[in-house]
Image (cartoon, helix red, strand yellow):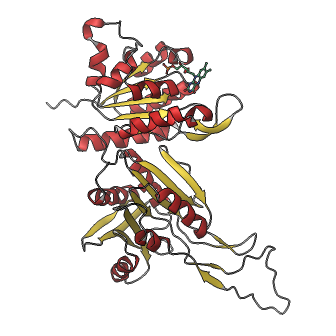
């Protein structure tokens, strides 16, 4: 008889107002077959009591190292875990973890865990932006922890800003991906993009004609979002430059919103300054109206239509490839072709000078807006990797698998 053991997850809860949201994360983890041990801090118990954690997890709950000493819980809980997720992670908890303090059960567990660790910080914007917190986050990321970027929105009281705990469903998704990758590569405890900064662009630019009209395209942004989420789950710090997608911010990702090709260029070049890889999945308009009409363009009295003059937009992919912000920076492009897909793709790869080009066929009902994609990834060294029809997440993983060996050595 085969005994299937459930993955062991430690859910650390520290003392933030968002502690109640960890109940939802706990439910999602237990209902999807994980054995969850909740380790709250003393402060966390001011917000949600031990009875709730114990009843929801089906496991004992304690905050300090002096209970059940014969079981040596300060060592065993961390050693036996397949994943530790701290949600919410207070500024205090990030500081303790970064500096290796061990004054309660959770901080001891963080020191003894050899599995992947995910932090979901939540705090007021001022606390999050404080250089002390930012340095602690950078330290944790450098060591391989996944620190999810907080969301922007309503905070405790009347304040709004960055620092809100991401949606528990998003945190769960990050945990699931981290666990999947970890169990695929047992023995590798650091996610493979840990310590890397990657930039992804997503969506489609809109080039305004007048205050009510624009030239746009059908890109939904789903492939770019899949790339950003996959990179975050693999431990990267991710900047997502998104144009007109309307998709909610993914957890663990810094989102920069733009509208036009010129704005997208500026945001991508800025983020690329210290990036290990840039993936241009956005559909950037090749042309824009030469003149922006400050008032709505009217119908002509003689029944004719206006002539719109277009000018070329900057070629961001070619520019990124020619002027790499860092030596060895990996640049990936996407080619959406309607016919002669591979031949056009090869020509585009040579013309743009990028390292990888994801070539896919697009059409009114193909690729744009759909959940699936089919592509061939062409590499500058001549390699071709076909990716069969499947979810955009699968293509995203393949792209990162191909980026990984091309990255410059980590510093
Ligand atoms: C009502 C209230 C809400 C708080 N919310 C947060 C929060 O969201 N994030 C945070 O970092 N600290 C927050 N704090 C402060 C922490 O509770 C405090 O720093 C505590 O020492 C954290 O302990 P711990 O990290 O051991 O859980 C809050 C405090 C109070 C009284």
Q: Position of residue 50 (x, y in %)?
A: 47, 13
Q: How many tags in the picture?
A: 0
Residue closest to the far right: 301
Picture quadrant of residue 384: bottom left
Q: Position of residue 102 (x, y in %)?
A: 37, 18
- Residue 62 can be seen in this image: yes
Picture quadrant of residue 35: top left
Give the left or right position of residue 224, taking residue 377 as reference. right
Picture quadrant of residue 321: bottom left
| The image quadrant in which ligand 1 is located | top right
Q: Depth check: 40 or 50 in front? A: 40
In the rendered image of this protein, does residue 330 appear above or below residue 306? above
What's the residue at 48%, 14% (across, down)?
42
What's the residue at 51%, 32% (across, down)?
132
What's the residue at 55%, 24% (across, down)?
16
- Residue 90 can be seen in this image: no
């Amino acid at each position: 008889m085969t005994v299937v053991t459930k993955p062991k997850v430690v859910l650390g809860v520290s003392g933030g107002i968002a502690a109640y949201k960890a109940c939802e994360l706990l439910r999602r983890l237990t209902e999807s077959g994980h054995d969850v041990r909740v380790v709250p801090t003393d402060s966390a118990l001011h917000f949600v009591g031990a009875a709730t954690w114990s009843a929801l997890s089906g496991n004992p709950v304690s905050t300090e190292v002096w209970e059940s000493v014969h079981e040596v819980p300060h060592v065993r809980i961390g050693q036996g875990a397949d994943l530790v997720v701290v949600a919410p992670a207070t500024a205090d908890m990030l500081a303790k973890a970064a500096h290796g303090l061990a004054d309660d059960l959770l901080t001891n567990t963080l020191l003894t865990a050899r599995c992947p660790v995910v932090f979901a910080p939540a705090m007021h914007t001022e606390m999050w932006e404080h250089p002390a917190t930012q340095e602690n986050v950078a330290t944790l990321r450098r060591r391989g922890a996944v620190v999810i970027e907080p969301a922007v929105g309503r905070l405790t009281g009347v304040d709004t800003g960055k620092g809100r705990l991401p949606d528990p469903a998003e945190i769960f998704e990050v945990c699931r991906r981290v666990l999947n990758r970890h169990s695929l590569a047992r023995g590798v405890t650091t996610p493979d993009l840990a310590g890397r900064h990657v930039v992804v662009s997503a969506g489609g630019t809109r080039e305004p004609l007048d205050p009510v009209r624009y030239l746009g395209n059908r890109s939904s942004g789903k492939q770019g979002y899949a790339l950003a989420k996959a990179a975050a789950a693999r431990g990267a710090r991710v900047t997502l430059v998104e144009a007109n997608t309307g998709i909610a911010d993914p957890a663990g990702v810094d989102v920069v919103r733009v509208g036009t090709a010129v704005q997208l260029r500026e945001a991508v070049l800025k983020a690329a300054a210290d990036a290990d890889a840039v993936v241009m999945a956005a559909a950037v308009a090749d042309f824009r109206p030469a003149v922006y009409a400050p008032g709505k363009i009217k119908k002509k009295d003689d029944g004719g239509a206006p002539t719109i003059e277009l000018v070329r937009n900057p070629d961001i992919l070619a520019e990124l490839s020619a002027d790499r912000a860092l030596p060895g920076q990996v640049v990936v492009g996407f080619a959406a072709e309607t016919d002669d897909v591979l031949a056009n793709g090869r020509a585009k790869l040579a013309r743009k000078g990028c390292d990888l080009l994801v070539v896919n066929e697009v059409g009114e009902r193909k690729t744009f807006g759909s959940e699936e994609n089919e592509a061939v990834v062409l590499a500058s060294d001549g390699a071709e990797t076909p990716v069969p029809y499947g979810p955009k997440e699968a293509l995203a993983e393949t792209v990162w698998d191909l980026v990984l060996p091309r990255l410059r050595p980590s510093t």
